[in-house]
Structure formats: C-alpha cells, structure tokens
Image (cartoon, rainbow, N blue to C red):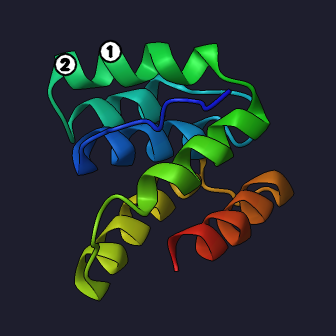
Amino acid sequence: MKTKKPNWTKSELQVYIMLLCANADKEETEEELDMIQKKTSKKTFLKMHEKFHKHTSKKRLDKIEKVINNHDYSQMELAAFRREMYKIFFSDCSFSMMEERLDMTLDNILY
C-alpha cells in the first residue's frame, strides 16, 4: 500500500521544521512558539502544529525528507532558513546535545 506524499507549501514545511527545532529538547517554550507564530499566519501555524503533534519523532523526519524534495530551495533561502532555526535553538541561551544532534540530522536532509 502506498502512503500519500505530503504536499506542503514552503511556508508549511518551514513551520513544521521550526516546531521540530523548538521540540528538540522535548520542551516547547512560549518564547519559541511565539517566534514561530510571528513567521507565518495563525491558520498555517495551527495546521502544522496539529500535524506535528500527531506524528512520532521518526515520522516527523520522514515527512520532512519527503516534502523537502518537492521544493527547489536556493542556497540563499536555505541560509536564511538555517538562521531562523538557530534563533529557535538558541532562544534559551543554550545549545543542548539533542539540539545539536537534530541540527546535524536536518543539515543532512536539507543539503
């Protein structure tokens, strides 16, 4: 049986990845969620937040890997996106081992 390939927009994918970054240490802070919400519409945020929390850790990475190939990101877009990811990671003024591991994993997926 084939599974349906997610067809998310770039904005939806970015919100989903930002949520993953915020959740890397298993705790999404209000500050992290506020940062993400400011980057998109409330509708998009709520849609992706709901999807994110329905998925397991493995499924989250699988979804990202499938969707990333649907979009043609430029190097400039990826660099800007990475900066946003780091803002989420460092919002609590630390870079935990779990965040570092996720960063390496996402680096392999994005590039």
Disc 2 residue type? Lys
Question: What residue is pinned by disc 2?
Answer: 42
Question: What residue is pinned by disc 1?
Answer: 46
Q: Residue at x 18, y 35 (%)?
A: 40
Q: Is residue 65 above or below residue 5?
A: below
Q: CA distance from mark 2 to mark 1?
A: 6 Å
Dividing the image into 4 quarters, which one contains the N terminus?
A: top right
Name of the residue lying farthest toward the bottom: 75
Nearer to the camera, 102 or 90: 102
58 sits left or right of 67 in the view = right
The secondary element bearing badge 2 is classed as helix
Position of residue 66 measured from the top left corner of the image (x, y, whole percent):
52, 52
Dividing the picture into quadrants, the one containing residue 97 is bottom right
Q: Residue at x 60, y 74 (%)?
A: 107
Name of the residue lying farthest toward the front: 1
The secondary element bearing badge 1 is classed as helix
| Residues at circles 2 and 1 in contact by the CB criterion of under 8 Å | yes
Which of the labelled discs sits on residue 4, or is there none? none
Circle 2 Cα neighbour tier, 10 Å, few/some/many (<14 / 14–19 / ≥20): few
Position of residue 21 measured from the top left corner of the image (x, y, whole percent):
58, 46
Q: Is residue 14 above or below residue 107?
A: above
Q: Residue at x 43, y 59 (%)?
A: 68
Q: Residue at x 71, y 60 (%)?
A: 95
Disc 1 residue type? Leu
29 sits left or right of 59 in the view = left
Nearer to the camera, 1 or 17: 1
Dividing the picture into quadrants, the one containing residue 36 is top left
